[in-house]
Image (cartoon, rainbow, N blue to C red):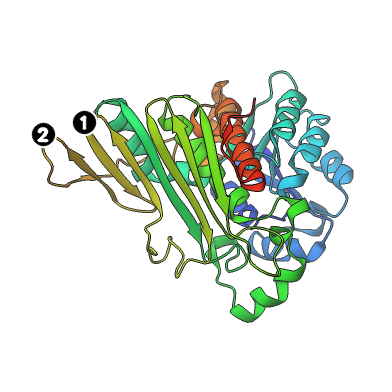
Amino acid sequence: MAKHRIVGISFDHMHMGDLLRLVHDHPNAEIVGIFDPDPAKMARAVANFALPPEKVFTDFDTCMRAAKPDLAILCAATADHARYAERLAAHNVHVFVEKPFAASVADARRMIAAMPKGKLLAINWPLAWIPAHVTAKRLIDEARIGPLLEVHFNDGNRGPLYHLADKVVVTEAEVAAQKPQSWWYKRASGGGSLLDYLGYGATLGTWYMDGRAPLEVTCTVDDTQGLEVDQHSITVCRYDTGLSRMETRWGTISDPWTVQPQPVCGFVFVGRDGTIASPDYATHVTLQTRSHPGPVLIEADPLPNGRRNAVEYMLDCIEKGEAITGPLDPAVSLLGQRIVDTAALSAREKRTLTLIP
């Protein structure tokens, strides 16, 4: 089988380097081109993957014509997702978008509508590849805690500028220098902790809830002097089964992939007959039931072949002609986007809202 030809489009999101590493390490894939208008943003990837000059582009159309990719990985600023997805669709490629889905429900629907027939669109939520969170889904589906009533989510990190691809740490001085011009801190570009992290809770929460939608959404955000985006948000979703709480934060004491901060980042699930705690990056989940209130540690299941990471999963679906499922499914992510948009509007209007269509 010929190798999958993959391009990386835009380096606005630091996860591009992580995704390209997955491509580089996959035996049946190759990086055939990378694009960003700013050559400096691509320098680390060029060095890490020994990319020759003929695979590095600062013009989008030239990149697509020369590279002739099968799949494009998109890591643009959130506000640019729809525009790039439509441009990529014109080149008849599969599209893999790094989270969040889009800047709005309207943009998300534009992206879905743009996809050519027979081509896959996937939205990557990195928490979907944490074995503990996948194990929690298995236990919920097995009714180990009875019917699922609530999903509680708390997540974040020290801030989006504190780390690069491969979790390379950035100094405080470098963060301070980057912050004034960074898209992460610009409202028009889709910055802020709510848009960065709430999609995780809303989208994976939709997956855990088997596609159920909340009836109402209430959200509040902080207001830091000198910043035009939030660094802390709290959202309450009212389902017909109860209240689910989802919190996002930039500015934790530590990053959860190194040292879990307090409050712990991850999920807690409440069922009729018990609860499950699934912290990010944990090796186990904790189960409590009414019949056995004492906490029981359950080791996380290893992810199966074809489902071990984002790129492997996408290529497996392409090779088998299978639809994208789970949190990466555009339909699941669209409901998550509806929750995010409703939360953002609720925060602006300072009132509870019914879920936007």
Residue at image point 19% right, 41% down: 288
Q: Amino acid at mark 1?
A: Asp
- Dot 2 corresponds to which residue? 291
| Depth check, front residue: 5 or 20 | 20
- Dot 1 corresponds to which residue? 273
Label 2 packing within 10 angstroms: few (<14), some (14-19), many (20+):
few
What residue occupies the far bottom of the structure in this picture? 173
Q: Kindly state the secondary structure of the residue where label 2 is placed.
A: loop
What residue occupies the far top of the structure in this picture? 117
Tell me the tag on residue 258.
Answer: none
Question: With 44 as the anchor, is 39 left or right in this view?
Answer: right
Is residue 99 at least partly visible in the picture?
A: no
Q: Position of residue 283 (x, y in %)?
A: 30, 51
| Depth check, front residue: 284 or 180 | 180
Residue at image point 23% right, 30% down: 144
Q: CA distance from mark 2 to mark 1?
A: 8 Å
Q: Quadrant of residue 13?
A: bottom right
| Depth check, front residue: 263 or 286 | 263
Q: Are marks 2 and 1 in contact (CB under 8 Å)?
A: yes
Residue at image point 46% right, 33% down: 238
Label 1 packing within 10 angstroms: few (<14), some (14-19), many (20+):
some
Q: Position of residue 347 (x, y in %)?
A: 62, 47
Is residue 130 at least partly visible in the picture?
A: yes
In the displayed structure, 149 sits above or below 277; it is above
Quadrant that contains the C terminus:
top right
Q: Position of residue 114 (x, y in %)?
A: 77, 26
Q: Quadrant of residue 45?
A: bottom right
Quadrant that contains the N terminus:
top right
Q: Position of residue 329 (x, y in %)?
A: 56, 29
Q: Kindly state the secondary structure of the residue where label 1 is placed.
A: loop
